[in-house]
Amino acid sequence: MCPDHDLVSAYVDGEVPSPWRERLEEHLATCGDCAALAAAYASLSMRLRSVAVGDETESLARGRSRLDSLLLDHAVPLASTLSARRRFVSLPLPVAAAAAILVLLLGTATAMLALKPSRGVASIQTVASGEITPLATEAKAQPASMDELLRYLDARDGQITLTIKLPSGTTFGSAGKPVIMRSGRVVRGTPVGGRSP
Amino acid sequence: MFSISGPPGPEDIRRLYDAAAPLLLRVVARIAGSSEAAEDIVHDAFARLVEKGIPFPTMDDAKYWLIRVAKNGALNYAKRKGREVKAYERWWRGERESTGGADEVVIRTESAEELKRGLESLPENLKAVLVLKEYGGLSYKEIGRALGISEGNVKVRAFRAREALFVKLGEDSKNVS
């Protein structure tokens, strides 16, 4: 039985492995048709390879020259990009450290300003100018100054309940009592709420 | 040698050119049917390699990539050229018919030109395999890697390409030796 023709074609290409190659050779030695087929494939290969296209050597040299130019063209932008990156990375250490410290200081200062509690005279004035609403049985007071406010309190022997509306935008620190009470003690020496120190 | 971590450098590419360019030029010239076109097509393949900066595990992988790209470039060129040739032939036939056809007797002799044209007129998938085999000197395994097909497929295509070429040449494979 004759082998498939694609196997004969593969044999001509040297692509049939042992032991199939030896068996095929035995068959070719005894089968005229298959031997003619193998010869035809081999002949076609030889004829194809004998067809000259042109001088490859010159093409190779020209191609190599073009490739060198191409690589040179690509090397320039790559090198400039790399050197720019190196310049950035190679900043002197003291300069980089100074920049880092500056950024740190600026950040800290900004944070402190944002979180700083509202203390001092300005705060007292702001609070003092607010509306003091006593219980419903008492008259509504509108003190114009700190002194008036303190006199108002003294007149009631300090036994009043106050609702103090604080300005919404004012920030108080975490350190305890409202500033107005401490100021009252300092100026007048009289405790708010009627208690002795 | 190339590393998997990065694209090939200029020296790698030069070494690759020295190793693969002769094969590429031969193969592309046969597929495209033109040495001049082969130069351009092979150069374009290397230019793509340089521009893309693809990392290849080995030199062979880069070579097979180049073969694939150059082969496609050659097939495209051949296709374009084929369309032009057909257009010229149509025009030429028209001219001959209008002038009475002075040289109607054509003596069919197998020439290098005939063989070349027969090869060029093969279907792309058959032509690529036969050219890589005959002019690239690649094994079925290497052709398979370059074209992304199995060795078995390469074997079948090589056989079909030969049979198709016999038909183009007006020969019967059983009667040619």
Image (tube, helix red, strand yellow):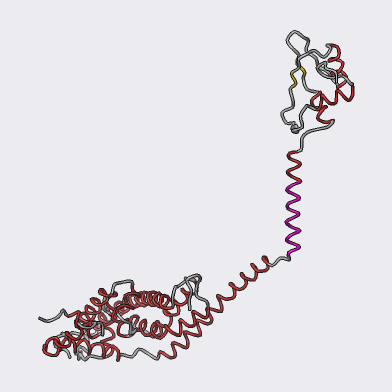
Where A77 sits versus A21, above or below?
above
Where A192 sits versus B76, above or below?
above
Q: How many marks?
A: 0
Compared across the picture, whether B86 is left or right of A114 comes to: left
Residue found 43% across the figure and 84% down from its top: B19
Residue found 75% across the figure and 31% down from its top: A172
Where A95 sits versus B17, above or below?
above
Work out which residue is located at the far left of the displayed protein and give it. Answer: A1
User: Which residue is more in the foreground, B171 or A104?
Assistant: A104
> How far across and how far down the image is residue B101, in percent?
22, 86
User: Which residue is more in the foreground, B49 or B143?
Assistant: B143
Residue found 80% across the figure and 33% down from its top: A119
The answer to whether residue A138 is magenta is: no
> How far across and how far down the image is residue A170, in percent?
75, 31
Compared across the picture, whether B100 is left or right of B138 comes to: left
> How far across and how far down the image is residue B25, in percent?
39, 84
Q: Which residues are magenta?
A: A93-108
> How far across and how far down the image is residue A167, in percent?
74, 27
Rendered image quadrant of residue B69:
bottom left
Compared across the picture, whether A156 is left or right of A137 comes to: right
User: Which residue is more in the foreground, B126 or B5?
Assistant: B5
Position of the C terminus of chain A, as image quadrant, is: top right
